[in-house]
Image (tube, rainbow, N blue to C red):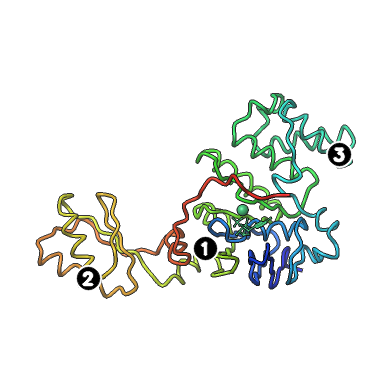
Amino acid sequence: MTHAIRAEGLVKEFKGKRALDRVDLTARKGTVLGVLGPNGSGKTTSVRILATLLRADGGYAEVDGFDVLRHPHEVRRLIGLTGQYAAVDEELTGTQNLVLIARLLGFDRARARVRSAELLEGFALSDAADRPTKGYSGGMRRRLDLAASMIGGPSLLYLDEPTTGLDPHSRNELWEVVRRQVENGVTVLLTTQYLEEADHLADDLVVLDHGRVISEGTPEQLKDRAGTQVLELRTSEADQLGLAIKVVEAVTSSPVSDDGLTARVPVTDSAVLPEVVRRLDEQGVAVGELSLRKPSLDEVFLALTGQPAEPQEISEETST
Ligand SMILES: Nc1ncnc2c1ncn2[C@@H]1O[C@H](COP(=O)(O)OP(=O)(O)O)[C@@H](O)[C@H]1O
Ligand SMILES: [Mg+2]
């Protein structure tokens, strides 16, 4: 079996409103499946169904070959889910927290200690192991939470927006530890609103919008398939940028964005390039730099969903 997760046609309604509308998801073993989507698109609902915490109204899902409805206990044994099972006690140290959870999972004292030390090391928390967790930073807590979810040695790890609210440094550290888990053969289901995160971590992506899969593939495939490229232009003299933008707008009939130095516009036809050059020349604009590049995943996301992937603080997440 090559699929760690296979879901077909998942449907979920809340009070007659469709949160999931025939969602298909597949995660290959030992890879990261990224589920991308704006707020309310159905990411958490999908994760909860795959974690057996919520029952779908339709469709089918299996984890490592186990049907989530018929074999919920087997499924729960296979997965580590951050934020759900792991309850970190503020007064206890990192080590004490992990040892406690390990003991609850049936580890004897010696094995609980060894496993905790291994995980603290693996999650870059060794130095803080003997400090109460109430003094931990947001990033350290998130890593401890992740470590706690890994105690039982799950073969799948579900991460629902694991880095929301973290600073870039903590985010990078978390990516690092997630990558290490994948190297050890763990399959990861990752939901995120950060395109950069998806680009870094995910082998395959599913883009959700209003409960539907609107695109899927590798990050590169999504970029290629977007059917657009981005024209970037810098003028030799910064004060000519305004004029250059007018010229580009006239040629491409698309709104041009700029940061005061570089102007950017999506183009679907590379034939506009010589036309832009000719008109700029006519207007006496000296071009500093002109290029066509693949869209970023952010630009793909915007094109697909009509919304920028601006992550919002997730505070009113419904969980039971
Ligand atoms: N327990 C619930 N009761 C009612 N509506 C819900 C519940 N959970 C989620 N929803 C709705 O389902 C849709 C998908 O939510 P969710 O899966 O949490 O999206 P995401 O995680 O992508 O932000 C949203 O419209 C949300 O309001
Ligand atoms: Mg969510």
In the rendered image, which quarter is residue 138 located in?
top right
* Residue drawn at (16%, 58%) of the image: 243
Cα distance between the residues tagged 3 and 2:
67 Å
- State the residue position of label 2: 251
Q: Position of residue 264 (x, y in %)?
A: 30, 59
Q: Nearer the viewer, residue 258 or 27?
A: 258
All told, the count of numbered labels is 3
* Residue drawn at (46%, 72%) of the image: 225
Category of crowding for the residue at label 1, using alpha-carbon neighbours closer than 10 angstroms: few (below 14), some (14–19), many (at least 20): many
Instruction: Please name the amino acid that badge 2 sits on.
Output: Val
Instruction: Please name the amino acid that badge 3 sits on.
Output: Leu
Category of crowding for the residue at label 2, using alpha-carbon neighbours closer than 10 angstroms: few (below 14), some (14–19), many (at least 20): some
Cα distance between the residues tagged 3 and 1:
40 Å
- State the residue position of label 1: 219
The tag on residue 87 is none
Q: Position of residue 310 (x, y in %)?
A: 46, 52
